[in-house]
Structures are given as structure tokens and as C-alpha cells.
Image (spheres, helix red, strand yellow):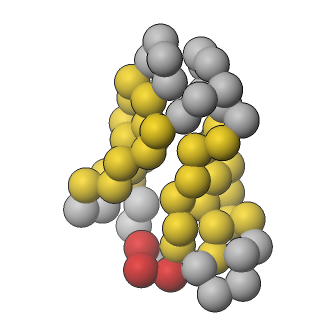
Amino acid sequence: MKIPELVFVGIGGSVVAMNRATGEKVWHTRLKGSDFVNVLLDRDQLYATTRSLAMAVGKTR
């Protein structure tokens, strides 16, 4: 899927990519740290932070 077709959400200690049209989960990854997760998409690189960790989740292409 292409980036415009996805929505990225930080929830429950995980980063989740969902299909924008259907809401179906495309992928998820569990992060170390707390349940509170922020996500940032910069071009094709997705970043996620918890209260104790910042990481590049991966290329989104």
C-alpha cells in the first residue's frame, strides 16, 4: 500500500498502520516503554516515541 492509503496510530504501546478506506489493520509493531505512543511521518520514514524510547520504525514505502 502507498502512504496516502494508510493511517498511522500509536496506541497501547504499539504503532499500527491501518487502511484509510476500510480501517483494516495492515501491520503493527510493539514498542518497549509505556503504553503512550506518539508517531510522526516524515516523507517515507515513520518515527515513534514512548516516554522512554524514540525510534525509527521503518521506511513506509
Whole-percent x, y for residue 56 in the image: 37, 36
Point 64% across, 67% down: residue: 18
32 vs 61, left or right, is: right
Give the quarter of the image for residue 23: bottom right
The x, y position of residue 51, in whole percent, is 49, 17
- If the image is split into quadrants, where does the C terminus sit? bottom left
Name the foreground residue: 17 vs 34. 34
Q: Quadrant of residue 39?
A: top left
**Left or right for 7, reference 44:** right
In this view, 41 is above or below 58: below
Q: Note whether 1 is above or below 48 in the view shown.
A: below
**Residue 51 to residue 39: above or below:** above
Kindly identify the residue that appears in the image at 73 percent across and 65 percent down. 25
In the displayed structure image, the side of residue 24 where residue 57 appears, left or right: left
Q: Residue furthest top?
A: 52
Is residue 12 toward the left or the right of residue 43 in the image?
Answer: right
Residue at (63, 76) in percent of width and height:
19
